[in-house]
Image (cartoon, helix red, strand yellow):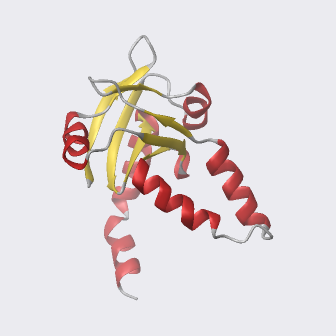
Amino acid sequence: MFYGEFEHNIDPKGRLILPSKFRDTCKECAIDRFFLTRGLDKCIFMFAEDEWRSQEQKFKSMSFTRQESRNFNRMFFAGATDVKPDKQGRFIIPSYLKDFSGIDRETVVIGVSNRIEIWDKKRWKNFYNASNESFEEIAENIFSN
């Protein structure tokens, strides 16, 4: 559903613009609301509302008697906020999510099928360079089972 890699800057009013390709997908799929939260690897996860509700059901079914489940749910849901991009596709990322992800101004917005990830540009480049070296090895390990 969401695919690609796009560089965008946060504007002086603190807004990030959704890449035009993603805005087109939103129009096609009637998506007008997203949920942002703390992601893994210090990025921000961005889910369309339907996908958010699906993920929410999975996480709610995790046993609250397990410490790891409680901790994950606390971080994931306490960090969540909903956003509705304006007509130009701009939205504000809360400061606590920018602090979590290390985002100041320059970002990379990537589509990862059912979600969007928002990365600090330098952090993304570091992740990409480290992962690019082992991409084939990772694929072999994942798909050989």
Quarter of the figure with residue 15:
top left
Judge whether 4 appears above or below 104 on screen: below
- From the viewer's side, name the closer residue of 134 and 110: 110
- From the viewer's side, name the closer residue of 15 and 100: 15
- From the viewer's side, name the closer residue of 30 and 123: 30
- From the viewer's side, name the closer residue of 94 and 139: 94
Please identify the residue farthest to the front as the structure is shown: 30
What residue is rendered at 36% in x and 36% in y? 108
Judge whether 131 appears above or below 111 on screen: below
Please identify the residue farthest to the bottom as the structure is shown: 145
What residue is rendered at 67% in x and 43% in y? 78
List x then y, in percent, for residue 84.
40, 32
Quarter of the figure with residue 23:
top left
What residue is rendered at 62% in x and 50% in y? 76
Judge whether 13 appears above or below 111 on screen: above
Asked whether, in this view, residue 37 is left or right of residue 131, the answer is: right
List x then y, in percent, for residue 87.
27, 24
Quarter of the figure with residue 42:
top right
